[in-house]
Amino acid sequence: MSTTTAAAQPAAESGGQMSHRQILEALSGLLLAMFVAILSSTVVSAALPKIIADVGGGQSAYTWVVTATLLTMTISTPIWGKMSDLFNRKQLIQLGLVIYLGGSILAGFAQSSMWLIGARAVQGVGVGALTALVQVILSDLVSPRERGRYMGYLGAVFGVGTVAGPVVGGLLTDNLGWRWCFFVGIPFALIALVLLQRTLHLPTKRREDVHIDIPGGFLMAAGVSSILIWVSLAGKNFDWMSWQTALMVVGGIVLLFGAVMVERRAKEPLIPLELFENRTVVMAVIASVAVGIAMFGTTVFLTQYMQLARGYSPTESGLLTIPMVIGLFGSSTLSGRRISQTGHYKNFMLAGAVLLTVGLGLMGMIDEGTSLVEVGLFMLVVGMGVGMLMQNLILAVQNVIPARSIGAGSALIAFFRSLGGAIGVSVMGAILGTKVTSSIEAGLREQGIPASGLGGGSIPDLATLPAPVREIVEHAYGTGIAEVFLLGAPMGIIAFIAVWFLREKALGTKSGIELAREEAAAEADAGADTAPAGGPTPRVTPGTRPTVSSR
């Protein structure tokens, strides 16, 4: 069992209570780290059509440039989360930033689509650390009751990063070249490293014996990868019903089953299975998968719609996504403050699920000729739904699990959200590629125009196409991407059902540091009570895991 010593933070030493100013100072580096994580995906999204055309990739490469990051982020998130329960969280998040920096430099010098995909995979490992640890460290500093207020700041950073990323990416692509989309995050990451070193002070964790579940992590990574590779390639490289499908799906399921078996016996499982005994955790996991599919699918293909269905530049397409960011920022901030005032969160999450469903349903009715005002209103509704759901799912889980499992529990929600996003982007990308190809080929046949390489899965450059061909391509992408949005609408319904059955518990008033100190003291007292008279206190086995009640 870990023992916690007082940190350099005076407030923590005196009882765990920190002033608003102290919390903001400690959060400065975390917020910038979160900005880096958001920027890594959004700054590239507006430039992806041009990037893929430049490196010679097709729709599959377009999808995998995004999926590679989601895949490695998904796989690494529970590993980072579990390590945060074992090691110094400040050093772990700094390590994540360093890995992100390495991936960014590699991506900026990419000479082929495969090189770029590999570099994005490295970036994803670093982003996985940031995704998992920012929420965990926030739980150390702030009680669940006050956490909604500060999660509003995270929502604000998410909004700024989401809107600034496409705009900055578009400006860089149009003026300096797309490689600067990867270099631009480097100074922010370096500043975040400095701020974390100077402002963040956490209790030091010391473990007598530490076990990392390497076999379980390997099996889980292999299983998830097998499923994701299948959904990305099926229907294009091979038939959905084929021996390749059977091999990848059955193999993935077997590997994941093996991971569960290993996790059940591991001293320090990456994903403690005891967490699934809690109904709140289970419902939050289901909702997180649904939100991940809807959120990532929408953001990835929205800029593709603006550029390939509407003909806007990367800069313009970034600016046109502002309504969605406004909805996300506003709903996240306002709902967070209200949750801190009342201590209740479920009604806001239900409202968010309804808005997400309605917004995606409306987005499913657009085409290449839909008024931008209407599209903007639909994006606003989607953003409001995501803002009310995303951060509050983690808050609900953090409020019902022991402090010693807060890292693994928080990472669990981020893991399934990322997993849903990765699967959603892969499936939606495969469906979109098939739909666009068939639509372009049919349109060209009707006009008696030779295909000339169109319809084969490559990303077209609208500026080089004759007017009749350009109209066919724009229509194909306009209707195809609308179908992708419509496919995401049922995910909002699933999220609503999961939140409905989620058991709400009034938010606690103690920070993670305070709870960890109390748990350690209780265990020390229990050890003292069971020690023989005049004998030493029995040592608690380091691998002992807490039982999570279904509160």
Image (cartoon, helix red, strand yellow):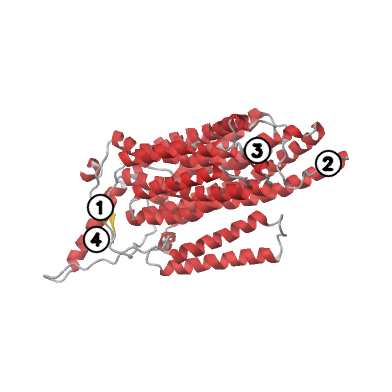
Label 1: which secondary element: helix
* Spatial separation of the CA atoms under disc 4 and disc 2: 73 Å
Instruction: Say which residue label 4 marks.
Output: 523
Q: Amino acid at mark 2?
A: Leu
* Of callouts 1 and 2, the N-terminal one: 2
- Number of residues whose C-alpha sits closer than 10 Å to that of mark 1, classed few (under 14), some (14–19) or many (20 or more): some
Q: Position of residue 326 (x, y in %)?
A: 52, 31
Q: Amino acid at mark 1?
A: Arg
| In the displayed structure image, the side of residue 394 where residue 431 appears, left or right | right
Q: Seen from this angle, which residue lies furthest right?
A: 448
Q: Position of residue 278 (x, y in %)?
A: 42, 58
Taking the spot 43% from the left edge, 43% from the top edge, the residue there is 345
* Spatial separation of the CA atoms under disc 4 and disc 3: 58 Å
* Residue 198 figure quarter: top left
Q: Position of residue 440 (x, y in %)?
A: 78, 43
Instruction: Say which residue label 2 marks.
Output: 444
Instruction: Say which residue label 3 marks.
Output: 50
Label 3: which secondary element: helix
